[in-house]
Image (cartoon, coloured by chain):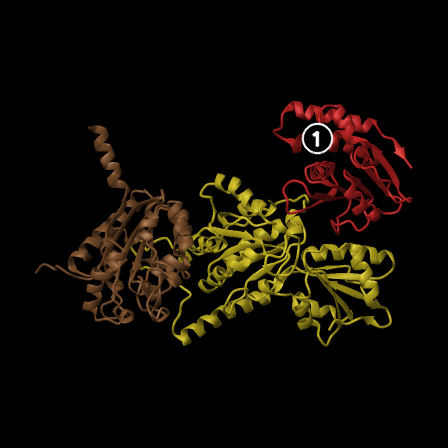
Amino acid sequence: MLVKTIFAGFGGQGVLIMGYTLAHGAMSAGYHVTFLPAYGAEVRGGTANCTVAISDDEIASPIASAPDYIVVLNTPSLYTFQNRIAPGGSLFLNSSIIAVEPSRRDIRIFKIPSAEMAEKMGNPRMTNTVMMGAFLKNTGLVTPDIYLASMEEVMGSKKKSIIEINRKAFTAGFEYSEEST
Amino acid sequence: MKKVFGRPKSMKANIFHYCAGCGHSIAHRLIAEVIDELDIRGITIGVPPAGCAVLAYNYFDVDMIEAQHGRGPAMATGIKRVLPDRIVFSYQGDGDLAAIGIAESFHAANRGENITVIFINNAVYGMTGGQMAPTSILGQKTTTSPTGRQSVLEGHPIRVSEIFSLLPGTTYIERCTVNSPASILRTKKAIRKAFQCQIDGLGFSLIEILSPCPTNWKMTPVDSCRWIDEAMSKEFPLGILKDVPAEQKKGERRHAG
Amino acid sequence: MVIGEAAIRAGCRFYAGYPITPQNEIPEYMAEHLRQVEGGVFIQSESEVAAIHMVAGASAAGARSMTSSSSPGISLKQEGISSLAACQLPAVIVNMMRGGPGLGNISPSQGDYFQATRGGGHGDYRVIVLGPATAQEMADLTMDAFTLADQYRTPVMILADGMMGQMMEPVVFKEPQPRVYPEIYIMKGAGAGKSKFIRGLILDPLDMEEHNWTLDRKYQVIARKETRHELYGTDDAELILVAYGTGARIAKGAIKRLRNTGLKVGLFRPITLWPFPTNELRDLAKKVENFLVFELSTGQMLEDVRLALQGFARIGFHGRPGGVVPTPAELANVVTRQYDRKQGIIEHH
C-alpha cells in the first residue's frame, strides 16, 4: 500500500499541521511516512501545501505526481491541484468558501462546509480539524483514535480546553459526510 | 651579578623581522613581559592577524593559531568559549580590526567576550606596501591616497577605542603609544590591566597602540616618533577611555561612604 | 532537527551560525538543546564569515564543531573552509542548498555541487562531501561526518537541500562512536611544555608545495577508502539513472513507475559526492550501456559522471534548476522520451 495526499490552502489555515498530525499518527501506527511541506517566503498569508505519503513499504519519493487524495481549503488550491489527482482518487473541498465546481469527473468529490461548521461551533480556526474528520471518515487512512492521540501529542502544551474543542470539531467532521458526485 | 634585562620567557629566541623603528617588536615584547609577570604563559592562546604581525608565532612562545584577515576575534571567541579558563588574546592591525574585521571585532566586543585585543594602529597598511588604512589621518599621503586622505572621497579616520567604549560589553579600553620610554612603560601597564580584566572574568578589553611605521610613512624612526606626538595623537587622543574595574571601585567607595 | 540531534549525539559541543532560509531549524534546535548539554556552546554569530571562524577556533580548542547554512551563506563561509583545510582542522558544515546564483530563491536545488566538490574556496584542497537522501541518512551521515572530520582532520560538508531539510520521516539514531582525536592536535595553552602554532601561512614556496602535497596525499587516501554509493535495481537494468539526494528520491519514484511499464531501469546514487565513486560507476558500464543523469541543476554532477563513463557508455541528462522540484512522473516521461531500446539514450552534449 502506498497512499499520497496533498493538503493545500492559505497560509494560516492550518494545512501544514493537518498533514503533520496525520503523518505523526500514521507513523505511530507503524507505517513508513514522509511529510513534505511547501510554503512561500511569507510567514502569514500566501499559499501553503504539504504532501503526506503513507506506505507499508519504504517510500521512494515523498513527492506526489498523482496523489490519491487532495484536500483543499481555498479556491486557488483547487485550481492548482485538481488536475493532479489520480483517476479514481478523491477530492475534499472546503465548500464554505470554494464556490466553483471542480472540473474533474473521474474522481470522487466530497464537499464539506468545514468553515461554517467550525464557525457554528464557535471557532473558525478549527476548519482544518473538521475537514480532517471528514477526510479520515472517508479514507480510513488511520483510525480516529490514532489521529486524536497524535493531535494531542502535536498540540503538546496547549490548553486542555483547546484540545477538547478540537476533538469535538473532529467528531463533527467525522459524522458529517455527504458525498456529492 | 644581578641580571636586570633579558628575554621574557614567553618570547622565542628569534630575531624580529620587523623594519627598523617599527612598533610591533616593542608591543610583542610588552605582551610577553606581561604574560610572564602574570604567570599565564602555559594557559595563554594568541591569535595573530594577517598583516606584518602574521609571523607573530615565530616570536611568542605561547600557543598560537593564525586567523584569516580580520577574523581574529571570531576565532578567539570560539577558543575562549570552549576553554573559558584559558587566557585568549587577539593581535590586530588597523586594517584587520577597523576595516575587513570591523564586524567580528565590534560584535565580539558587544557580546562582551572575555578576551583581550591588542590593536596596533599605525595609520597605514604595512605588509601590503603602504596603502591607506581606515585610521589614516586626513591629509595623510599613502600609495592609495597619493594626494592625501580627503574626507569627501575616503571618509574620516575611525576612532576605534571611542566607539568600542560605548559598548556595554567592554571593560577596559585605553589608547597608548610606544614612541618614548615613558609611553612604553605606560603601555605595558595598560596591557597588564587588560589581561587582568580577562583573568578576573570581566569581559572584553582592548588596548590601542599608536605605533610607528617609518618605512611606509617614509620617515626616519625618530621623525616617526615625533609624528605620533605632533599629528597622530591629535586625531587619536591618548588615555583611558573605559575602566570598568576603577568605576566599580569608585562606586563601592561611594557606597561605603 | 534531525541533523541537530544527530550532531549533539555525535558529541558536537560547539555550533555557530547565522539565520538563513531554508535551514533555520538547525540553529533553532541547537540554541535550545546544545546549551543544555554539558560544555555545549551555541552562538548566533554576526555573520557567516564570523561563524565559520568561530568554528575554527572551537575546533582548534578541541571541541567537535559545526556550522550550517544555505547556498549564499556557504559562499561567505568559503574563506573559513579553505582555512580549515589548510590548518587541518576538523569541522562539519551543513549546506541546505537553495536556488541560485545570487540570492536565488528558497526552494530546493542542487546548484552548489561544483562549489562543494571542487573545494569551494581558494587554494588546492578538497572537502569530503556527503549527500543524504533520507532523514535516516541525514542522521547517520551527520554522525559519520564528525568521525571522518576527526579521522582526516579536514572539513566535511553535508550537502542536502531545502526538501531534505523540511521533509519528515521517522529516524532511529545509531550509537555514537567514541571520539578518537589525538591530544597533540588540540590547542589549549602550552602548560609547562613547548608552545605550538597552527597556521596555513607558509611563505617559502618549497615548504608550501610540500604542505600542498601532504594535503594531496591525504585526499588520495580519502578518495581510495571513503567512497560510498547505493545501487537500486541495477542488477537487471538496461538503463541506469544517476542521481543524488532529493534527485535520487525522485528517481526512485520514477523507476517504480517505469518498471510497472516493463522498462528495467536502475539507480546509481553517489552518497559521497567527493570523493565521487568513479570506479564503482564505471564497473556498471561493463554490463549497462545507457545512463541518464538527473539533477536539480543545469548539469554539474554530470561532469563527474562523464569523467567516469566517457567512452564506456552513452550519457543522457535531465536537469531542473532554480528550485523546481519535478515529480517522479515527469522524470519517467523524460526517460521514455530520451531512451529507445534500439537506439539507446539520446546523448547530452
Q: A15 above or below B31?
A: above
Q: Position of residue B5 (x, y in %)?
A: 15, 60
- Residue at the image position 58 percent from the left and 64 percent from the top: C115
Q: Position of residue A132 (x, y in %)?
A: 77, 33
Q: What's under tag 1, amino acid-wise?
A: Arg
Q: C303 above or below C75?
A: below
Q: Residue furthest front?
A: B152
Chain identifier matching the red colour in the rendered picture: A
According to the picture, the residue beneath numbered tag 1 turns out to be A125
- Camera-side residue: B95 or B1? B95
Can residue C171 be seen in this snapshot?
yes
* Visual hue assigned to chain B: brown
- Camera-side residue: B152 or B15? B152
- Residue at the image position 24 percent from the left and 57 percent from the top: B234
Chain identifier matching the yellow colour in the rendered picture: C
Q: Quadrant of residue C255?
A: bottom right
Give left or right: position of B21 versus C151: left
Give left or right: position of B164 versus C314: left
Q: C53 above or below A142?
A: below
- Camera-side residue: B116 or C140? B116
Q: Residues within 10 Å of mark 1 (few under 14, many from 20)?
A: some
Mark 1 belongs to chain: A
